[in-house]
Image (cartoon, coloured by chain):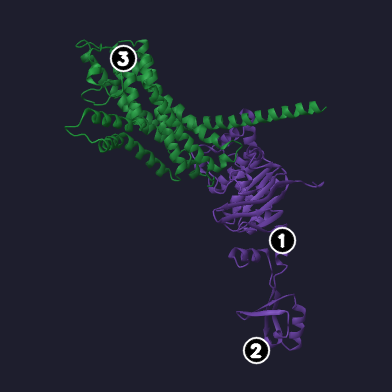
Amino acid sequence: MTGEKTMLVETENLTKRYGDLTAVDSLNLKVKEGAIFGLLGPNGAGKTTTILMLLGLTEPSSGRALVSGYDATRNPLQVKAITGYLPDNVGFYQDMTGRENLRYTASLNGFKGSLAEEKIEQALVKVGLREKADKKVGEYSRGMKQRLGIADVLVKEPQLIIMDEPTLAIDPKGVQEILGIIKDLAKKDGKTILISSHLLHQIQEVCDEVGIFVKGKLIAVGPIAALGEQLIKDKSLEIELSAYPNGEMLLNVIRKFDEISSVDHEGDMLILECREDIRDRLSKSLLENNFSIRHLSLRGISLDSIYRQYFQGEVQ
Amino acid sequence: MDDRSNTRGALQKITRSFETLQQANTGLSAVFRKELVDLLRGKRFLILAIIIAFTCLAALYTASATIRSTVGSEELDFVFLRLFTTSGASLPFSFISFIAFFGPLVGIILGFDAINGERDRGTLSRVLSQPIYRDALINGKFLAGVVVIALIIFSLGFLVGGLGLIVTGIPPTVEELMRLLAYLTLTVIYISFWLALSMLFSVAFRQTSTSALAGIAVWLFLAIFAALLASMAAEAIYPVTDNSDVESIIEQASLEQALSRFSPTTLYDEAVTTLLNPSVRTLGLVMVEQFIGAIKGSVSFGQSLLLIWPHVVGLIAVVLICFAIAYIIFMRQEIRA
């Protein structure tokens, strides 16, 4: 334990197998207290399974999951008392009002009477549902339900909040509202939040730290910026080039560079795959040979493109 | 110093286990209260109560009409109990046959979507992520169901009894009241079996329609086909022809009875007959020789109870078995929306 923030969530070689399929493969995940951690990965990567193991709702095949020092399998009650879980496709009792639904949650947590009412009121205010709280949940929109889900999590005043795909199937305005609430929860209330999602941009917007999770394995962990570097390190760069006159002459110039490993045509643009950034030397050389350069740029290697590659399963 | 810290450690341990226990109770009572309110406020309770109340009142009406015409013409004892057992010419059902027929339906309707309904609505994972034990959910639901069943059955029984009292004007004896209470309690246990069974189906099947159909299928099977099947099996094992000896006839009859007693419906029917008909002395085979010289009369309540004790134990055991299986499956199940 350093003088800094402690780890609220820690897994040690957490593994879950379903028959031959390994859904989660020796996962070592660490989430700092007070951080927003994004678990990013395609559908079926094992995100939900990991979350269920963190909550003690599924037993791991091997390894263990610790939340605030409690083993989730052995002390599920202690873990669930300090952890709020917002499942994907969160559901409520349709013929009860939002407030009644929260009241049930409060009673399951052992809160009664005015204490419960107070907590419910606070949670409703935080998600901006106070006015609609006494309507039946059946009349709620998808976004409102999701916000009620967050209120439901807040009623027990958890240290850790786990959200499974919180922005799925919600319109852009609703997504912004929810992301705003999430940010507030971390910054103002100091909650630790673990978000699982397959939507990179939303994760990018709110998370301090991201783990990319593919096929049960955590491939890279770190702050978004560092993550890019981590993954880009061994990848070759792509340079877009358009010059006049194009054709065989141009290719001859290009072939002189050893760094370029391959050349692709994309419309009237050439895509040069190379080991390092050779734009300076390339432009000089082209000018010397009387080419006029129309376009020359380094193709941005964003997290986006890398993440997409993982999605398509191109990178093993 | 060491001693003191030891004591403190032990104290802490005790406090913690006490807190855990309290937490478990919190979950159970919260689920129980919510389910009870849900069941009582729900439309299905209203519909069930209305259907059953109407049919039972109809049964009471015919019974009292029949009794009025027969009282005096022949010697009648246990008139109060006859309110529940007598059927008339216009309506060939008595109160007890109505309850025996509709009771299972009540149990099935109250329990068929207990768990898979929660799963469908996406509330299961939300509820189970609260600090409660997983069994608190299933226990609370079962207990709430049993309370609702008891509420329906006892209020119906007393309603019919009270109205019968007004109609016939003959007050019940203490023994009759005890028999009635025993009958109502037995009915609650029997319907709880159907509740446990339908909850088992709701855990085992993902679709609420599948679990409802499975419950109804078992109900029809036990109500109609089980007895047929038992007699067919007995006949196949001990074929009886015109010139068979007494032994094989007895063997066949007792095998048939033994087989049919595997069905909770048979157990319940036999127990009800014994409880509400004090003249029933035995449920097994009786030879004519055994009857010779017997004095006509009724059996005391204690003796009737003794006669059906195995039935009661059997019914409770079946309830527990169903519930235990549901429990085991549920504890091992993956909780996913």
Across and down, in percent, residue A185 comes to: 69, 45
Disc nearest the viewer among 3 and 1: 3
Are discs 2 and 3 both within one chain? no
Q: Is residue A26 or residue A145 the one in the foreground?
A: A26
The numbered mark, 2 or 1, whose residue comes first in the sequence reads: 1
Q: Which residue is under mark 2?
A: A248
Secondary structure found at label 3 = helix
Judge by depth and name the residue closer to the eye, B328 or B124. Answer: B328
**Residue occupying image coordinates x 35% and y 40%:** B217
Q: Residue furthest left?
A: B242
Q: Give me the disc on residue A227.
A: 1
Q: Nearer the viewer, residue A36 or B282?
A: B282
The answer to which quarter of the image holds residue A261 is bottom right
Which amino acid, mark 1? Leu
Callout 1: chain? A
**Which colour is chain B painted?**
green
Can you identify the residue that label 3 sits on? B80
